[in-house]
Image (cartoon, rainbow, N blue to C red):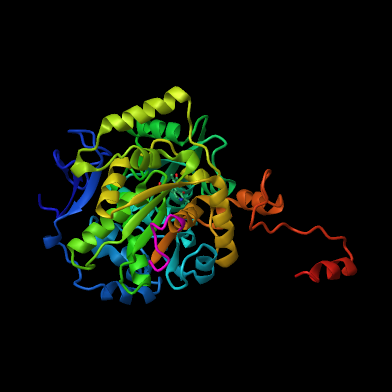
Amino acid sequence: MSDPAFQQCIKPTCGATYAIDDVRYACSACGSLLDVCYDWSRCRVPKSPALFNDRRGAQPDTPAGRLDYSGVWRFRELLPFANSTNLVTIGEGRTILQQADRLAIEIGHKPGRCFLQYEGFNPSGSFKDNGMAAAFTMARSLDRGRVGCASTGNTSASLAMFAGNTSTRAGEPIRAVVFVGDDKIALGKLAQALDHGAMTLQIAGDFDACMRLVREATDRLDLYLVNSINPFRLEGQKTIMYRVLEGLGWQVPDWIVVPGGNLGNTSAFGKAFVELRELGLIDRMPRLAVINAAGANTLYELFTERGLRWNGGQVDDRVVLDHYQHMEERGWAARTVATAIEIGRPVNLPKALRSLDALSGVVRQVTDEAILDAKALVGQHGYGCEPASAASVAGLRLLLEEQVIAPTDRVVCILTGHALKDPDATVRYHANGGRDDVAAPHANPPVQVPAEIEAIEEVLRSC
Ligand code: F0G
């Protein structure tokens, strides 16, 4: 194979390889997921991360400057699957790692040891833009004009924004088709898909139904699928970890804590660290904590409760099938206030198990109440986030209580989406004075005041 980049089946006993431009979302020999792989000896990877740091100050006013400005493509040597003329960017990945001392104190962690990675600062307001830059690059390399996804909202928002801002090689607009669950998507995200001109199909069903349908549509129609089952998406999402490392001066943290939905991030993060170690850019691995919402806890059930493991690539599929059958028999469907991660059948499950293996991972579940309380704390002491993102902080709090994570451990929680994605959830938490049954501990309800200065003065006395 002349190209140093290729696709490969993740199952070690299969290992079938495919050319980089061979469009498929599963191995045709055994049906497993595919990785994008590299013969690193034929790629030009810098010996130290200094080059990536140097690019951070780039100005986006020239084509080369735009690539360096991108928080994805300034690491392009670490995801070298495309010709540089096809790299697509809309200014993604300029995100912030915040040392969150006040939050740390609130949740029983040590100041100086707790960090939040704000991926909500991406152009479309979520981490998805990292992956979408890579997926659209592939769409352009393949010269595809119609791009689609199933989504709980953020993938569709990101896809729609990228489609609105890019074109085919012939300069034609890229058409976006998104499948979202009827009544299942936060308003901010639906608004984005509509605003950016995507054809938005509201399916009478949940994310899992959308995912099933979009895969069928991909096979039948001329649709390039950019869900995280597309391995190129995950190449872009590796860069979230590069930026975390950069924020820590390339010192590896003790833990990465991430919400788990379709498990794309979980998969991408593991791949990022395995490759960095292979390339000698880091000398040790962090541990990984994946946090499910209790109402969408498939990974928790399988990994933590039923002991399912990567097992050198021999995942016991019977355990998974048995679990899914049990879900169906009970009529169980995922349900959580964190709608972004309301997913029952995560497509990247085997890759996530591989990451958990490589990074000595743990999986926990947290209640909707714990998620909303953690979200309120992130808002109070930082830049805010949407409910699904706060699962990471709720998970950190739980793991501190369990003493799995020590207060002295250096921990990075990934905040995957912006607070304005789902303002309803925020207002419900604060404005109703909390929850129906118990008072929410961090609620900040608006105060009704007569239009009189004396009344305002009275209220402000307690401020
Ligand atoms: N956080 C947010 C804000 C998300 O939108 C998602 C996934 C996740 C976490 C979970 O990430 O799938 O990599 O485990 N949202 C997808 C969507 C499913 O369609 O927008 P994951």
Query: Residue 74 appears at what percent x and percent y?
Result: 31, 67
For residue 452, above or below residue 140: below
Residues in magenta, as a range? 401-409
Give me the residue at 36% from left, 61% from top.
255
Query: Residue 100 appears at what percent x and percent y?
Result: 49, 69
Q: Is 417 on the left-hand or right-hand side of 75?
A: right
How many labels, in total? 0
Q: Is residue 388 magenta?
A: no
Which of the 4 quarters of the picture holds residue 456? bottom right
For residue 303, above or below residue 243: above
Which of the 4 quarters of the picture holds residue 11? top left
| Residue nearer the viewer, 149 or 291 | 291
| Residue nearer the viewer, 179 or 33 | 33
* Magenta stretch, main secondary structure class: loop
Query: Residue 27 appears at what percent x and percent y?
Result: 21, 37
Q: Is residue 405 magenta?
A: yes
Q: Quadrant of the C terminus?
A: bottom right
Outermost residue toward the top in this view: 329
For residue 26, above or below residue 158: above
| Residue nearer the viewer, 207 or 107 | 107
Give me the residue at 44% from left, 43% from top.
176
Give me the residue at 44% from left, 67% from top.
114
Q: Is residue 406 visible?
A: yes
| Residue nearer the viewer, 37 or 375 | 375
Q: Is residue 79 visible?
A: no
Query: Residue 31 appears at what percent x and percent y?
Result: 23, 33
For residue 435, above or below residue 446: above
